Image: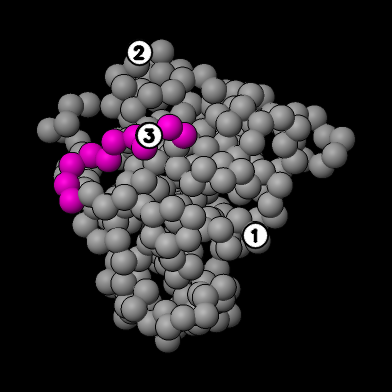
Amino acid sequence: MSGSDNPYQDDRGNKDRSITNPDGVGEIPSKTSGKTSPAEGSPFLIGENMTGGYGKGGPDILHNCTIAVNPGEIAVIVGPNGAGKSTAMKAVFGMLDLREGHVLLDGEDITALSPQDRVAKGMGFVPQNNNIFTSMTVEENLEMGAFIRTDDFSDTMAQVYDLFPILKEKRRQAAGELSGGQRQQVAVGRALMTRPKVLMLDEPTAGVSPIVMDELFDRIIEVARTGLPVLMVEQNARQALEIADKGYVLVQGANAHTGTGKELLADPEVRASFLGG
């Protein structure tokens, strides 16, 4: 697919950093236009040479797997069912026991930290399932996302409502009454309320219609425009690679192919094996 055929490949510069967290360990570099170049040295977030599985005695699911993302990038993890895509994401978030490898966030080794501590360090994680409080209103869900903050988060909530206007319209409605796509917007919005340094999404378009998928991808692009790194697991591989700056194809828990989204879409082996030719 050429750039002119791809509705997602546009100017993806850093337009608004206010929803991201530039403070703390390091600062997300400002960029006014164009593609974000890889940072000097180590990537902003990297799970490097990860080997491990669930539990102390369980078999390894990941085998020397590496995934990374830099500020302003969208990095996607794709592959066949059972390839370890979500497992790799959970390993980066600290939900998996690593027997080898490490996870670095902004140059800091966070391998030993719990998921809760990683949230405090700046990870915003949106799981595929059970990612909203269904009995709470939309606004209450967003407020729950700000639980680690002690400052006034009203500006962040306004930015989330700007990103997802339907949520502002339905802010007094129980989140469980929303459509699947709207629930995903609530889940992403709640993660953004923490003002994360990196946003991690586990199959955000699972179970939604193609139209809703396109809308969610548009919003994800807008998030990346702020300079926030986005790491995403996706079952809709072709569509995900169309918006990806970087792609990782996993097979049996190991890296099979790595490249830009455009490179992987054009790779005959990737197309034949994972994209239906």
Measured Cα–Cα span from mark 2 to mark 3: 31 Å
Q: Is residue 39 left or right of residue 42?
A: left
Amino acid type, label 3: Glu
Note whether residue 215 is visible. Answer: no
| CA distance separating discs 3 and 1 | 26 Å
Q: Which residue is located at x 38 percent, y 24 percent? A: 259
Task: Report the residue that reaches farthest toward the left.
Answer: 4
Q: Which corner quadrant of the image does residue 69 belong to?
A: top left
Query: How many numbered marks appear?
Result: 3
> Looking at the image, is mark 3 or mark 1 nearer the viewer?
3
State left or right for residue 123 relative to residue 215: right
Q: Above or below — where is 265 with respect to 220?
A: above
Amino acid at dot 2: Pro
Occupied quadrant, residue 269: top left
Among the two numbered marks 1 and 2 on one chain, the one whose residue lies closer to the N terminus: 1
Which residue is denoted by mark 3 in the rendering? 40
Viewer-nearest residue: 149 or 161: 149
Mark sitting on residue 268: 2
User: Residue 74 lies in what quarter of the image?
Assistant: top left
What crowding class fits label 1: few (fewer than 14 Cα within 10 Å), some (14-19), or many (20 or more)?
Answer: some
The residue wearing badge 1 is 117
Label 1 amino acid? Answer: Asp
Point out the stretch of residues depicted in magenta: 32-42
Measured in 3D between alpha carbons, the distance from the residue under mark 1 to the one under mark 2, in whole angstroms, is 42 Å
Residue at the spot 72% in from the left edge and 36% down from the top edge: 98
Q: Looking at the image, is mark 1 or mark 2 nearer the viewer?
A: 1
Q: Residue at x 61, y 27 (%)?
A: 49
Which quadrant of the rendered structure holds the C terminus? top left
Q: Which mark is residue 259?
A: none
Local secondary structure at mark 3? loop
- The x and y percentages for residue 7 are 18, 42
